[in-house]
Image (tube, grey):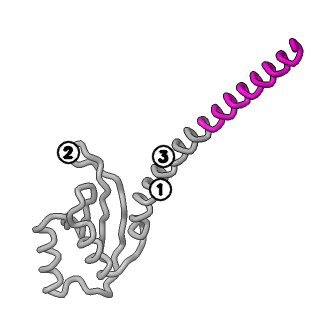
Amino acid sequence: MGEAANKAISFGVGIFVTLLIASGVITMFSQMQNIYKEVNETDTSVTSRFGRYAMYDNTTITGLEVINCANKYYNDNLIVVEYSGVELNTETGLEYLDDQLNLETIKYEDKFKSMVEEVEYDGVTKTKISFTKM
């Protein structure tokens, strides 16, 4: 009976150790999955932040796209839209743009050179999208 008891105890200890190792591996995988999820969310956020301005970075666009950009980023505190030296992300800036449209200075088919850069305003880094008529 002593030998059978030793085998049973060894078998029980083996099962216990196996369960400990398995639960440790499962816990580790669970933590790694959470970390990868957070990294993926951060990566997606950074990519979408810079990707959404790609169409304005050193490209030629139309007057209609300038108007759409000004309207799209109107209330965004981290975006500054500039047309020929006038910032368009304020109420007066949009009124200025509307005045230009009424005077037919900007036409939908006009071509503009656009540029995106990071600038600092009052200690806050913002994305500045500039348009210059060609």
Mark 1 vs mark 3, CA separation in Å: 10 Å
- Work out which residue is located at the far front of the displayed protein and give it: 1
For the residue marked with disc 3, what is the amino acid?
A: Glu
Q: Which residue is mark 2?
A: 122
> Which-is-in-front pick, marks 1 and 2?
1
Horizontal side, residue 119 vs residue 31: left or right? left
For the residue marked with disc 2, what is the amino acid?
A: Asp
Q: Which mark is drawn over residue 38?
A: 3
Instruction: Check disc 1 and report its element: helix, strand or loop.
Output: helix
Q: Earlier in the sequence, mark 3 or mark 2?
A: 3
The front one of 17 and 39 is 17
Q: Which residue is mark 1?
A: 44
Q: Which residues are magenta?
A: 1-27
Q: Is residue 2 above or below residue 119?
A: above
Determine crowd level at label 3: few under 14, some 14-19, many 20+ residues with C-alpha closer than 10 A. Answer: few
Q: Earlier in the sequence, mark 1 or mark 3?
A: 3
Instruction: Check disc 3 and report its element: helix, strand or loop.
Output: helix
